[in-house]
């Protein structure tokens, strides 16, 4: 049997959080290996809104400047609620930095400064086991090879996370709500304000965000799973969505965005994933020197637009904790530490990371969960009143969640 590879830090998952964690560690002079199951960088999902807290994390990662050049500022929110013959509107300014990025630009910016060989593609993990010596974890790949990791970080998403499963975390919950997303290009410039338009028409929820003067991102959330959506040609799904919106007298400026979208940019998901706030508040996110970050830790629906930015914060805080612990061990004057001591140091760093993130993530998850109850579950008047009270306490209207600063790397 071939001898197992050995690595100091292994990150499972090459999405936003996994790449951000690898880059944060690299900025601190710490090597890591990212194991990604796909054969290329994953950039599905069209656009992603990044609020001020996410931009602060991107600044610490050293990629904010180049990414700002790819997306203009969104200066206002424009909410339109159409119910029957009644239409209500609300427009208010964005008081923090908000930009909509092309997810591909974000993924490539995080990956390009990593050392050659830091990302290994086509790696499917069959199982994770505790290292027999108690020094990290052993990953068994689908092809039978094994990798020993002194530190293992699961950034492998909200569904089917092998690292979350190893930690004993329950599976994430789902809300069956199909969402079609895509880009629409305007070679001669689009006619829209630099705004985030949020339109509710009947049971459909539509979002439109400007990216540049020539590019717009949109999403359409449908009311319930419809037969034949999964696996359907995305052009057909787009045409079906467009007709549904037209039947509900959706404004032409919205239906035209959907009609003119780039077919290659279209992306469909059939459900939202989330980890309930009580699991985030109480979950066991560490076993020795093994932990999780991003959606594997705190998957949340898109209701407050913080899933990606929260993962960027995780990356900064986790890398900072590991770097401080390493510096403290090296400065202790005891010379080289053995594997057992290194495992204790890494475990302590991970425990510090979890302590620092726990309250922040529990509050974000609570806000997203309550907002989701209001938007998709048709609550009773009493439940609705309770949800509104919670959102007021959390400062949802003032976007308090976006003013957070995860600190310096």
Image (spheres, helix red, strand yellow):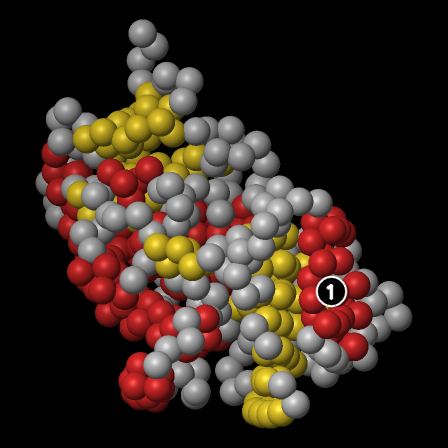
Question: SS at mark 1?
Answer: helix
For disc 1, the neighbor class at 10 Å (few under 14, some 14 to 19, many from 20) is many
Residue 277 in the image: above or below residue 264: below
Q: Position of residue 297 (x, y in %)?
A: 32, 54
Q: Which residue is mark 1?
A: 242
| Image position of 32 (left or right of 257) | left
Q: Residue at (15%, 36%) from the top-left corner?
A: 337
Q: Is residue 19 left or right of residue 233?
A: left
Q: Quadrant of residue 367?
A: bottom left
Left or right of 84? Residue 342 is left
**Residue 72, placed above or below residue 279:** below
Q: In front: 272, or 197?
A: 272
Residue 364 in sight from this viewpoint? no
Tag count = 1
Residue 328, above or below 95: above
Give the residue displayed 69% in from the left and 75% down from the top.
248
């Amino acid at each position: 049997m071939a001898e197992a590879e050995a690595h100091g830090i292994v990150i499972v998952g090459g999405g936003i959080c996994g790449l951000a964690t690898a880059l944060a560690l690299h900025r601190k002079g710490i090597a890591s290996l990212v194991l990604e199951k796909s054969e290329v960088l994953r950039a599905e999902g069209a656009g992603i809104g990044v609020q001020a807290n996410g931009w602060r994390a991107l600044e610490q990662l050293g990629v904010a400047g180049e990414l700002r050049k790819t997306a203009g500022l969104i200066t206002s929110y424009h909410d339109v609620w159409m119910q029957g013959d009644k239409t209500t509107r609300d427009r208010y300014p964005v008081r923090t930095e908000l930009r909509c990025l092309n997810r591909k630009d974000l993924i490539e910016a995080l990956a390009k400064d990593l050392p050659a060989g830091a990302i290994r593609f086509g790696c499917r993990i069959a199982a994770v086991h505790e290292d027999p010596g108690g020094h990290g974890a052993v990953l068994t790949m689908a092809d039978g090879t094994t990798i020993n990791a002194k530190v293992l970080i699961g950034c492998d998403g909200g569904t089917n996370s092998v690292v979350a499963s190893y930690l004993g975390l329950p599976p994430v919950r789902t809300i069956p709500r199909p969402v079609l997303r895509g880009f629409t290009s305007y070679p001669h410039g689009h006619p829209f304000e630099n705004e985030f338009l949020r339109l509710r028409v009947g049971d459909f929820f539509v979002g439109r965000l400007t990216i540049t003067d020539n590019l717009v991102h949109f999403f359409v959330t449908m009311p319930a799973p419809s037969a034949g959506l999964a696996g359907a040609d995305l052009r057909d799904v787009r045409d079906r969505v467009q007709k549904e919106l037209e039947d509900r007298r959706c404004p032409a400026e919205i239906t035209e965005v959907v009609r003119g979208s780039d077919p290659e940019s279209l992306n469909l998901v059939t459900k939202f994933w989330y980890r309930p706030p009580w699991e985030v508040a109480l979950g066991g996110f560490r076993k020795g020197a093994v932990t999780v970050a991003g959606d594997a830790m705190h998957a949340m629906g898109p209701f407050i637009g913080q899933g990606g930015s929260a993962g960027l914060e995780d990356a900064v805080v986790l890398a900072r904790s590991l770097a401080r612990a390493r510096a403290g061990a090296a400065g202790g004057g005891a010379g080289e530490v053995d594997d057992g001591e290194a495992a204790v140091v890494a475990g302590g760093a991970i425990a510090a990371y979890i302590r620092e993130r726990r309250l922040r993530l529990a509050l974000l998850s609570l806000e997203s969960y309550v907002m989701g109850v209001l938007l998709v579950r048709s609550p009773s008047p009493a439940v609705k009143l309770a949800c509104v009270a919670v959102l007021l306490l959390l400062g949802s209207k003032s976007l308090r969640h976006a003013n957070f600063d995860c600190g310096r790397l």
